[in-house]
Amino acid sequence: MPYCSRCGVEVDPGVEKCPLCNTPIQKLEDISEIKVAKKYPDEPIEESSIKRRTEKEKRMFALEIVSISLALPFLITTFLDLIINKSITWARFPMLGFLFIWGTVAIPLLFPKKPIILVLGEVSFVMGFLALVDYFDDWKLEWYVTYALPIVIVTILFSSLVVLASILVKKKGANIAAFILFGIGGLTFCLEIIISRTISWSLFVLTPTVVIGLFLIYLHYRFTKDIDIKDKLKEKLQI
Amino acid sequence: MKERKETFREWFRLDNAAVIFSLVSSPRIPALFRLSVTLKEPVNVSLLQTALNKTIIRFPYFRVNLRPGLFWYYLRKLKTFPRVEADSKYPCKELHVRKRGTFPFRVRAFQNRIAIEFHHSITDGTGGIIFLKTLVVEYLKLRGVKAHKVEDVFDISEEPSFEEYEDSYKKFYDKNLPSIKLPPKAFRLPYKLEKPGVYHLTTGIIPVKEFIKKAKEYNVTVTEFLVAIYLDSLQEIQFNFLKNKPKRKLKPIRVSIPINLRRIYPSKTMRNFSLFVTPGIDSRLGKFTFDEIIKEVYHFMRTELNDKYISQSIRQNVRAELNPILRIMPLFIKKLFGRLIYMGYGEKRYSGSLSNLGVVKLPPEMEEHVEDFQFLPGTNPERKVSCGVVSFKNKLYINFGNVSNSKELEKIFFRKIVKMGIPVKIESN
C-alpha cells in the first residue's frame, strides 16, 4: 500500500498526490498499473430541478414582463377612450407615455453592451417623445424646436463628453470629479443661452466649477505618486 | 391528546432545532449532513428505488415538504415518492428545501454506495441513521439476504407511533430554570472560502481497537480523545497564524460537540433531539500541552453531560422560540434576522465542531455485504471545517468536511494521530 512520505498516512493505490499535503506519492512499479475505482464522480452535478437562465433569457424574460404589464394599461386607456368618445382623444397622451416607457426599457434589454446603439436609441426616443407631446397638444410644433430639442442635445453632449473623458483617462481619481464639475458648469451656461438668450447668472455657476475643477486637476496630476494614507498618518502622529 | 393528532393530520410544526435551519438554509449554509453505506457490489438503482418506496411509508415524518406559513415554516406531508439521484463530486450541496414538492433529504447512489443527505429541518444524525439502516436492510432483503431483527432498524410493516413525531425539546422544557450567559466569540479558522457548493472531503480510516487502546492510556473515551486532538490542532494553527499578536488578544478555542439527548431523556423521537456541549481552551493563557487539553476536555465533558445543565440549554432554546415578540413577526422578517442570529449567537462562538455518532451496527448477516458506513458533517462559512465520526465494524471513520481553500487542519490532525503510532488511511474527493 502506498504511503505519503511526509504525513505518514496510507493512501489508495493509484492516488498521485497526498490528499493532505499534496506531496507526490512515490510510485512502485508493480502498483502503478492498478486502477482503483474512484470514490466520487469527477464532476460536480448541478441540481437538475433548477434551470439556470442565461443572461439573454433573463433579459428576454424581463422584456416580456415589461411589455405585458405596459400593454394592459395601454389597451385599457385606448378602449375606454374609444368607448366613451368613439375616437382617440385624451388617450393619446397616456398611450404615448406607455410607448415611451416601453422604448426606453426595451433598448438596453435588446442591445446590452452596445453603447452607440444604446445612446442613439435612447436619444431618439426622448426626442421623438417630446416632439409628439408638443405636436399632440394642438397639432403643431411650438416649444419643441426652441427649447426641448436644444436642451436635449446639449445635455446629451455634455454627459457623453464627461463619460468619454472619464473612460479615456488612464489614472482615475480627482480628475473625474473635475470633469463632472466642468460638465455641470458648461451645461448651465448653455441652458441659460437657450432659455433666456443672454449670459448673466450662469457665470456664477461656471466660474467656481471651472476654478475648482482646475484645482482638482492640478491636485490629481501634481501628486501622481501613490500616497499611503495610513503610513502618512503614522509618520505625522508618531504613535 | 395533542401529539396523536400529528399521526393523521396533514401537517405538523417544526421542532425547536429545525426552526433555525428552516430559516437560514442557503447555498452557503446548506444545513445538510450525509450518511452513506458502501456495499460490496454495485448498487442496483431500480431495486434501491423499490426499497426506498417501501421504506418511506414507515417514515411519514420524512415524507414531507417544508412550507411557509404566515409566521413559521411548517412541514406538510407529501403523497409522492422521493427519487434516487446520481451522486456528485461535492457532497452536501444546497438542497432547495423550500421548493414545493421537494423532499428535505436526497438519496444518492454511486457505484457501490448508497448515500442520504438529510436536511437538518427533519432530523439529526440518530434519526438519519435509523432511516438509512432501514433502507439498506430493505434493499438487501430485496437482494435476497435474510436477516434477524436488530435494534434501530424499523420493521416497515409496523405503524409509525406518535412518539416518533414528537418535539422532545418542548416535552422536556422547564420554564423555571435560569438563563445562560452567552460565551464570548471564539477563534475561527483564518482561511478563504471556496465557491458555494464546493466541499472538500477528507476521510481518515483508523482501526478502532488501536485507537481505543491509545485513548485508554489517557483514561478517556474516544470522543474525548478526538476532541483533545482537534483542540490541539486548532491551537497549533492559531499560534502559527497569529504569531505576532499579543497573547491576551487571542480568542479562546471552543468546539461544539453535538450530544444525542435520547441517551439522557426518555424519548423515541425521530426528529431533532440533540444539543451541544462546548469544551475549549483559553489561548490567552498560553499554549496548552496535550495532557492539559486532555484534562480540560475530560472534566468539562463529565461535568456538562448532566441533565441539569442540558435542561438549562433546552430551556434557553425553547424560550427563544416561544418569545411572543418573535412569534408575531411575519416569516419574511424572521428570515431576515434568522441568519444574523444564527451566525452571531451560534456560529461565531465556535471554532469548529466534532460530531461522533458512535458505533453503528447492522444485522450480522448483512454486515458481510457492507464495506463501510460513513458520516459526513454539514459545514458553514463561519466554522469552515467540521468533523464527523462514526465507527462501523472494526474501523473508525473520521470525515472532515471543508469549505475553505486550506486543508491545514486535517493535515495537522491526522499527522498527530500518525505520530501516536496509529495507522491512518486517507481518502478524499
Image (tube, coloured by chain):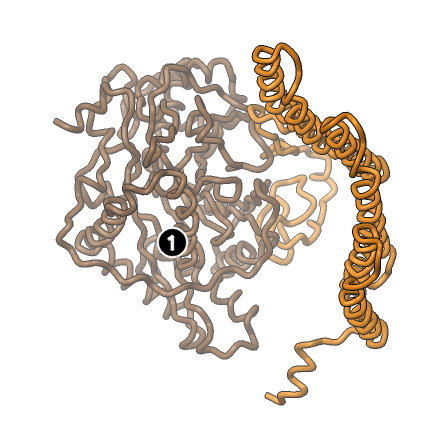
On the image, the x and y values in percent for residue A169 come to 86, 59
Q: In the orientation shown, which residue stands out farthest toward the bottom? A: A238
Under mark 1, the amino acid is Gly
- Where B212 falls versus B242 (above or below)? above
Q: Which chain is orange?
A: A
On the image, the x and y values in percent for residue A97 come to 67, 29
The quarter of the rendered structure image containing the N terminus of chain A is top right
In the image, B77 versus B157, the foreground residue is B77
Q: Residues within 10 Å of mark 1 (few under 14, many from 20)?
A: some
Q: Is residue A172 visible?
A: no
Count how many numbered circles sit on residues in the image.
1
Residue in the image at 31% along x and 61% along y: B182
Q: Helix, strand, or loop for circle 1?
A: helix
The quarter of the rendered structure image containing the C terminus of chain A is bottom right
In the image, B189 versus B201, the foreground residue is B189
Question: In the visual, does B73 lie left or right of B99?
Answer: left
Q: Which chain is brown?
A: B
In the image, B377 versus A102, the foreground residue is A102
- Name the residue that disc number 1 marks: B346
Residue in the image at 33% along x and 31% along y: B74
Q: Is residue B46 visible?
A: yes
Residue in the image at 61% along x and 30% along y: A45
In the image, B217 versus A187, the foreground residue is A187
Q: Chain of mark 1?
A: B
On the image, the x and y values in percent for residue B330 come to 35, 39
Residue in the image at 70% along x and 45% along y: A16
- The image quarter containing residue B295 is bottom left
- The image quarter containing residue A94 is top right
On the image, the x and y values in percent for residue A227 come to 75, 76
